[in-house]
Amino acid sequence: MLPSRMECTIAGCQFEPVIGDVEQNITTIREITESLSEPVEIAVFPELCVSGYDLEAAVSTATPIPGPITDQLKRIAASTDVTLVVGLAEQTNEAVYNDLVSVSPAGTVVKYRKQYLWGAEATTFTADPGPTTIETPVGTVGFLLCYDLNFPEAALAYAREQVDVLAVSAAWRASFRHDWDVLLQARALDTTCYVIGTNHAGDQRGRTHNGGSLIAGPDGTILESVRSGTAVVSAEFDPEFVREARKRNPVAEMRQK
């Protein structure tokens, strides 16, 4: 674990991307990050927010990681001293992946590839199973993307790593609104960690997103939530809260017996 700050805030940053307009979406990421209250350690943005949630746009704007888009994110992270977690499509020689990238103020880039592909995603992207974690001043952070949230085994891999924060980035439709809240709280209880759930807002080419970004505590309670529009949810990270939740709900200890 990296050295911790006296007070650390974790945040989820909800907005409605412009389909296919990478530069505008990165500008929005920068503006939201610059507006965050201090000190924010980690800010989580929605799935595929660099392109907007449109599979054609995602493929046409897919980029190597690291590459020119992560270079822009590095500059934002460095100037704001915030670790960014951002959804974008990754292009390799072999395939296109639906990624979350973490970009630290020091310029470290780490990518997580979506494990479980929803609907037409399965004919667009390649799945890549396995957890990804980073070390930050708030502790160990793990990642899930949207439909991954439905699979307890995906969160269980992070529970075994004893992550302190689970960052969930999504393009979650309004028709599944109830599932979103319940699953985020369940994953907080499964993993006994903070969960940041960040979703798209608005209507993108007829696909209405739920908004409803929230932060759940390690006991499953919702600490802060929003409903629609451009908005930020934030909470102070309290390592004692994590320790007490794990005493109250010793699932990690019982799994090992």
Image: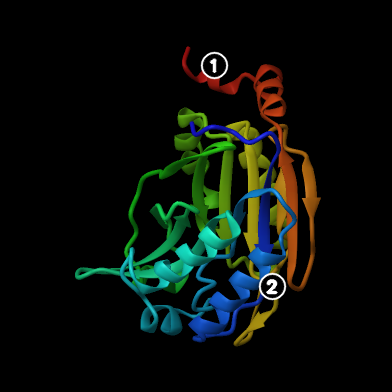
Mark 2 closeness class: few <14, some 14–19, many ≥20 residues within 10 Å: many
C-alpha gap between disc 1 and disc 2: 38 Å
- Give me the residue at 37% from left, 84% from top: 60
Which residue is label 2 attached to?
Answer: 201
What residue appears at the point 78 percent right and 70 percent down from the top-left corner?
A: 228
Picture layout, residue 237 above or below residue 162: below
Above or below, 117 relative to 163? below
The picture places residue 167, in percent across and down from the top left corner, at 57, 49
Dot 1 alpha-carbon crowd within 10 angstroms: few under 14, some 14 to 19, many 20 or more: few
Residue at x 49%, y 78% (from the top left corner): 51
Q: Which residue is mark 1?
A: 253
Quick check: 49 left or right of 13?
Answer: left
Residue 247 percent location from the top left of the image? 67, 17
Q: Secondary structure at mark 1?
A: helix
- Identify the residue at the far left of this view: 93
| Residue 35 appears in the picture as rendered | yes
Looking at the image, can residue 118 be seen?
A: no
Relative placement, left or right, of 63 versus 174 is left
Q: Amino acid at mark 2?
A: Ala
69 up-or-down from 247: above or below: below
Where does residue 207 sit, x and y in percent of width and height? 62, 80
Question: Which one is in front, 207 or 37?
Answer: 37
The answer to which quarter of the image holds residue 121 is bottom left
Of the numbered discs in the image, which one, if any, rests on residue 183?
none
Mark 1: amino acid: Glu
Q: SS for tag 2? A: loop
How did the renderer colour the structure?
Answer: rainbow
How far across and how far down the image is residue 199, in percent? Answer: 64, 64
